Amino acid sequence: MSYRFDTRAIHAGQPDDATTGAIAVPVYQTSTFAQREPGVHQGYAYGRSENPTRTALEANLAALEGARFGLAFASGLAAVHNVLTLLQAGDHVVSCADLYGGSYRLFTKLYARLGITFTFVDATDPVAVERALQANTRLLWLESPSNPLLRVTDLAACAALARSRGVTSVVDNTFATPVLQQPLALGADIVVHSTTKYLNGHSDVIGGAVLTNAPELDERLRFFQNAIGAVPGPHDCSLVLRGIKTLGLRVGRHCTNARAIAEWLVADGRAGRVHYPGLATHPQHALAARQMSDSGGIVSFELEDEAAARAFTRAVKLWTVAESLGGPWSLLCHPPTMTHASVEPEVRRRNGIADGLIRLSPGLEDVRDLIEDLDQALTPSTRTVSLATSGGAR
Ligand SMILES: *Cc1c(COP(=O)(O)O)cnc(C)c1O
């Protein structure tokens, strides 16, 4: 389909219902499907293997990322797990160091036990990525912008490097969303999403997705999807399809709000370091401007220590202290004790995640109310790191 992004978001994979003409894809709340005789059916045999509401979502997600194939999962981590199932004992993975804490836990606590080894690198430096590749490296795992420091990786350079060495490159595109960045077009082999975040966008579903253009990868991933069975129910698929209808509008507003907040934090000066790819002081600002169509919806900043961060989280009134991001409600979290609590303290600090780090996911509210709440919560008692310049420096 050659329609533009916002048109694809509304139409792709969703023809009017063949039997009733319903324009919204019905929720096919059924576990199984009648067969005229054994093996003779209308393309649907059993709900784990396929469901028409899920098929619509999978086709829609694929269209958003410019992919030929899409698979939906019960959670983002189920999607990550499905991709990791491509590996076997003896294989090696190179991954960016500041990745989603749950992915790090899955890699180091579960897959490491199965004889798969991992090297974590600063992927903002393609030379470091190249040096980490080994003869047995099978996967390159990237997130950009990264979580929670919003570091930006040159996806085209890293994907080309991986391809030249026969390594499959995977990009977790949850933070950027396909609105701002489409990794397959930059040369990546697989895109992963937590649809829990911006894609569903209403903080009421847990879900995941895997997209690819390669038929041989899709065939294996599809087999794992059915064999493992971590599939989303039809109602959740329907909610994500509804959420995607407004994806472009919402991400636009999230970006506007995030930029206003990042610029206000810098001008205000009470937050020591402000991490946001849209700031000219961000170390990969130029790359972000080239690779993404806007700077994204997440901002993080550093207070002096955990006590200052805790005092700040107690002081906010409009912002909700919660895990997750990408919904209409403005959420904030303290990564060291929340999203990244499963990362060992010394690894966390080595990766630049300070004990006083706060991650903001501005919602869709009026940004003036969001800033006024930050202003009153950042009392002089929430002392900050004193730095001459702001920006994403480590
Ligand atoms: C939330 C998240 C995940 C995991 O997704 P769930 O839906 O919570 O399982 C993976 N990657 C990133 C970048 C995320 O933000």
Image (cartoon, rainbow, N blue to C red):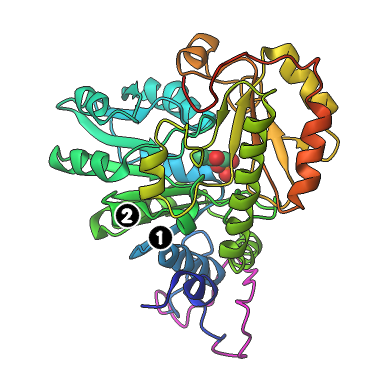
Question: Tags 2 and 1 in contact by the CB under 8 Å rule?
Answer: yes
The residue stretch that appears in magenta:
18-40
Give the vertical position of 253 relative to 4 (above or below): above
Q: Compare residues 324 and 363 and report the one nearer the observer.
A: 363
Q: Badge 2 is on which residue? A: 184
Q: Is residue 66 magenta?
A: no
Which quadrant would the N terminus be assigned to in this image?
bottom left
Q: Ligand 1 quadrant?
A: top right
47 up-or-down from 181: above or below:
below
| CA neighbours of label 1 inside 10 A, class few (<14), some (14 to 19), many (20+) | many
Residue 37, image x, y percentages: 44, 80
**Res. 327 visible in picture:** yes
- Can residue 21 be found in the magenta stretch? yes
Which residue position holds label 1? 65
Residue 13, position in %: x, y? 47, 74
The image shows residue 346, relative to residue 26, as above or below, that is: above
Quarter occupied by residue 250: bottom right
In the rendered view, tell whether residue 270 sits above or below residue 186.
above
Residue kind at label 2, given as amino acid type: Leu
Instruction: Give 209 or 124, whichever is nearer the viewer.
Output: 124
The residue closer to the viewer here, 72 or 197, is 197
Q: Looking at the image, which residue is at 68% across and 50% down?
A: 327
Mark nearer the N terminus (2 vs 1): 1
Q: Is residue 83 visible?
A: no
Q: Could you say where residue 310 lies in the image, as x and y percent from the top left?
A: 76, 19
Secondary structure, mark 2, is helix
